Amino acid sequence: MHVRQLAKRSAFYIERTGFRFFSRCIKQIFQKADEGESPCPTVRRLIDNRLHETEQRFQDTLRLRARMHAVAENWGDKPDKKPSGNVICHLIDEFTKTPE
């Protein structure tokens, strides 16, 4: 099978895996294949990098979720207030003054 045909087929499989490599990553993979080298180490490195990035985003999201739950619980019993002075929404103003 010609490398370009393999590239099209591989792109299909890469897309189907849901990893959604950026085009620059796919270029790295096919460059290795074009050079007659195994792209597997490159794919492993790319996945490891993406996993690390995804884990960081996931942890950030968990922290945000926990903070939002705490705020929602705290705000549940707060009265609705009209804007006053420079304060448009007292809930948000109070929230921004609260340490994380």
Image (spheres, rainbow, N blue to C red):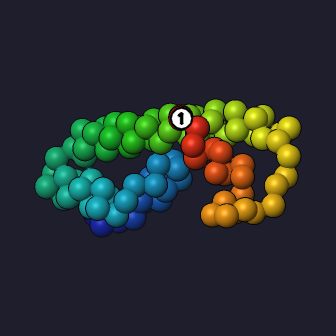
At 82% from the left edge and 55% from the top edge, which residue is drawn? Answer: 81
At 34% from the left edge and 64% from the top edge, which residue is drawn? Answer: 23
Determine if residue 41 is in view. yes
SS at circle 1: loop
Judging by the rendered image, the residue that carries numbered circle 1 is: 99
Q: Residues within 10 Å of mark 1 (few under 14, many from 20)?
A: few
Farthest left residue in view: 35
Left or right of residue 47: residue 66: right
Where residue 31 sits, quadrant-wise, is bottom left
Is 15 in front, or is 60? Answer: 60
Determine if residue 10 is in view. no
At 82% from the left edge and 42% from the top edge, which residue is drawn? Answer: 78
Is 16 in front, or is 6? Answer: 16
Where residue 38 appears, as percent x and y from the top left, is 22, 43
**Quadrant containing the N terminus in the rendered view:** bottom left
At 27% from the left edge and 53% from the top edge, which residue is drawn? Answer: 29
- Labels in figure, total: 1
Where residue 40 appears, as percent x and y from the top left, is 28, 40
Q: Is residue 42 above or below residue 82?
A: above
Where residue 27 appears, as percent x and y from the top left, is 27, 61
